[in-house]
Amino acid sequence: MKRWGIGLLIGLGILINYFDRTNLSVAQQPISNLYHLNSAQMGIILSSFGWSYALFQIPIGALLDKIGVKWLVRVGTLIWSMATFMTAVVSGMGLLILSRVILGAAEAPAFPAASKATGYWFPVRERGLATSIFDAAAKFSNVIGTPLIAWAVFVWGWKGGFWVTGILSLFYLALYWIFYRDPKEAKLSAEEEKLLREGGAQQIGTAPGGYGKNLMFVLSQRKIWGLTLGFTAYGYSFYLFLTWLPGYLEKQMHMTILKSGWYTAGPWLIATITDLVIGGWLVDHLVKRGHDSTRVRKTILVIGMILGLAVIPAAFTQNPNAAVCWIAVALGGLAFSAPIGWSIPSLIAPRGTVGTVGSVINFFNNLMSIVAPIVTGFVVDWTGSFETAFIIAGIVLVLGILSYVLLLGKIEPIQSPFEDSETVNA
């Protein structure tokens, strides 16, 4: 059962990782007041994390496939901890943005590494729940992190949230350094070793053909683009809520920072539950019962995206309780589609390229961490409300649904031509 301990360790890392991403969202009002920023300027600052995070996704994929999960996450966690502390001690907008850019670069390995490690540590029939553990942690971070950071900001000022999350990041670094090992380094029971070997767990090793050729091959596959574009559409709404939900509640619903923190937690709690129960347990349960794996995953994937369209009615209410309920429906649906999307790279990638495929998908997905905050900020400044911003998110989701339906195809391993040539040459 060592694999489930590893799964929880990975999930804890994503939880703390997302504390560091949301602390600026919670502190945006006092920062805006301090530096006299409008919504468009704040949108640019909120997006600065995504500049380096997205840029580093492709090279991170190569590094993951080359040097592995363990050392890349160790180094990344150390740097992101330092970047969080840096945010708390700098003064001036330039250094504030610089610290967020460093944070984005350091956290770039987080999700591709989690996906790759899950592929190593779990057989296919457990991949849904294992993936949902770390994906749900990203949602649950807002359930406990947003109120925690809001409290820290209320007590110690806007820098307090960064001190708290920096300390938690160092705590996780110590845990990861001590406990994470790849399966080949761990002392597994004979039963667990057999389960991984015969259950379709990904094998550790580099891809035949080299990184450049494999990247070009992956980018030529329609299946990869179907997954990528669908996940990118999900990312737009996810990052809109992640960066602007507290600001929406403060600006449009006229809440205090503390109250917005608690109201923000509700939809993210729903998202955490649906992520684990539907995107994780239900998918694995249906596949184990003998239902077609592709049909199960694609059906639940698309249903989740359709529920995400509840962001549109949320745009047309001035009642904060109704708005939060619609947002909870949207986030709940998007949440259970996400772990399915994250489990697919380890199910379709050619041997040795899970990190590459995951980084391609995450690159485009995280371009939305730049686009969504900026577009939302400018639209809010232009229109004076969040209505148009939420409608834009709905339109993007429709395009993502079409990508999943028309381009993804059957969820099965892509056969690499380089693997065939390696076998012949052998």
Image (spheres, grey):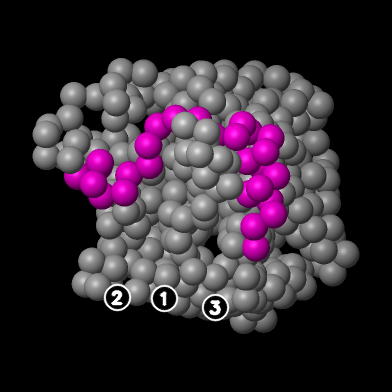
Magenta run includes residue 62? no
First of labels 2, 3 by sequence position: 2
Could you say which disc has been placed on residue 291 in the image? 2
Image-based side of 339 in relation to 291, left or right: right
Residue occupying the point 57% across, 68% down: 408
Residue 404's place in the image compared with 374, above or below, is: below
Magenta run includes residue 213? yes
Residue 278 placed where, x, y %? 34, 67
Quarter-of-image position of residue 10? top left
First of labels 1, 3 by sequence position: 1
Amino acid at dot 1: Arg
Q: Are marks 1 and 2 in contact (CB under 8 Å)?
A: yes
258 or 58: nearer the viewer:
58
Residue 273 placed where, x, y %? 34, 62
Residue 87 placed where, x, y %? 64, 25
Residue 131's place in the image compared with 175, above or below, is: below
Which residue is denoted by mark 3 in the rendering?
Answer: 306
